[in-house]
Image (spheres, rainbow, N blue to C red):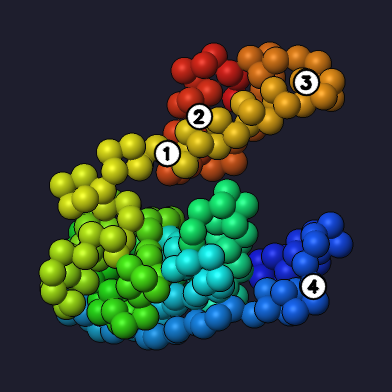
Amino acid sequence: MCMLDNAKKQLGNAFKYCQVDDEVWESLQYPSQILQVSIPMRHDDGTLKYYKSYRCQYNSTLGPTKGGIRYHPNISRDHIEALSFWMTFKCACIKVPFGGAKGGICINASALSNRELERISRLYIDAFKNFIGPDEDIPAPDMYTDERVMGWMYDEYRLIKGGHPKDIITGKPVALGGLAERTHSTGYGGYYVLEKFVKDMQKAEKINKPLKDMTIAIQGFGKVGYWFAEKCYNNNIKF
């Protein structure tokens, strides 16, 4: 089962518990729009290669869509659609005024030089410049993209569109209007959710020991897992 099929299966399992009508169900089966392009990039050695790139805006009922841009060689259209599907529900569950979106490039970012990484990041914005915008779709960092990449993307959008549209991209460097706490916020947030969950389970008498006596399994050690692990370490939680 592919990621998109699994996402739709999760929706199907949850639907019977939701007070929504059949038309809402139908609307959630399909993304609002997806743009797929092939970006040509000339590498430092002079070779020209094309990279499949995507941006999916799944649902904008609550507001402009929002979601990360990831660089990975296994990215596909279904992959991006599934991630934007999940972003739609993530935004809805925490009641923020955004819809769900996701983007990506099918590329091995770890094999790129710094100049190539900047080049492909700027080319992505040039390809999607009329698909994104502060009131339409707001990109953010994700796998193999960080505040440096977001800074290049913001700068490219600014050069193309003019002005200083700091609300076009989140996760930028502080000097360009980003937030100082952005880097570790997702990992720390996951820890706070776990902490709250354990406390609630203790109150419901479904868990009979505190978090400090548990051992936590962390999948991955990237932008989320690293900071989650740091929070566990600082609070003497075994992982």
Foreground disc of the pair 1, 4 = 4
Per the image, the residue denoted by label 1 is 185
Nearest to N terminus: mark 1 or mark 3: 1
Quarter of the picture containing the C terminus is top right
Identify the residue at horizontal 68%, vertical 74% (top origin): 28
Badge 2 local density, few (<14 within 10 Å), some, or many (20+)? many
Distance from disc 3 to disc 2, alpha carbons, whole Å, reads 25 Å
Q: Amino acid at mark 4?
A: Asp
Whether residue 186 is visible, yes or no, is: yes
Nearest to N terminus: mark 1 or mark 4: 4
Per the image, the residue denoted by label 4 is 21
Quarter of the picture containing the N terminus is bottom right
Q: Estimate the x, y position of residue 217 in percent, counting from the top left.
A: 64, 32
In the figure, residue 236 lies in which quadrant? top right
Foreground disc of the pair 2, 4 = 4
Nearest to N terminus: mark 2 or mark 4: 4
Distance from disc 2 to disc 4, alpha carbons, whole Å, reads 41 Å
* Label 3–label 4 contact, CB within 8 A: no
Distance from disc 1 to disc 4, alpha carbons, whole Å, reads 35 Å
* Label 3–label 2 contact, CB within 8 A: no
* Label 2–label 4 contact, CB within 8 A: no
Q: Estimate the x, y position of residue 47 in percent, counting from the top left.
A: 23, 81
Between 180 and 52, the one nearer to me in the picture:
180
Q: Estimate the x, y position of residue 230 in percent, counting from the top left.
A: 46, 26
Nearest to N terminus: mark 3 or mark 2: 3
Whether residue 149 is visible, yes or no, is: no
Per the image, the residue denoted by label 2 is 229
Per the image, the residue denoted by label 3 is 203
Identify the residue at horizontal 59%, vertical 41% (top origin): 219
Nearest to N terminus: mark 3 or mark 4: 4
Between 38 and 197, the one nearer to me in the picture:
197
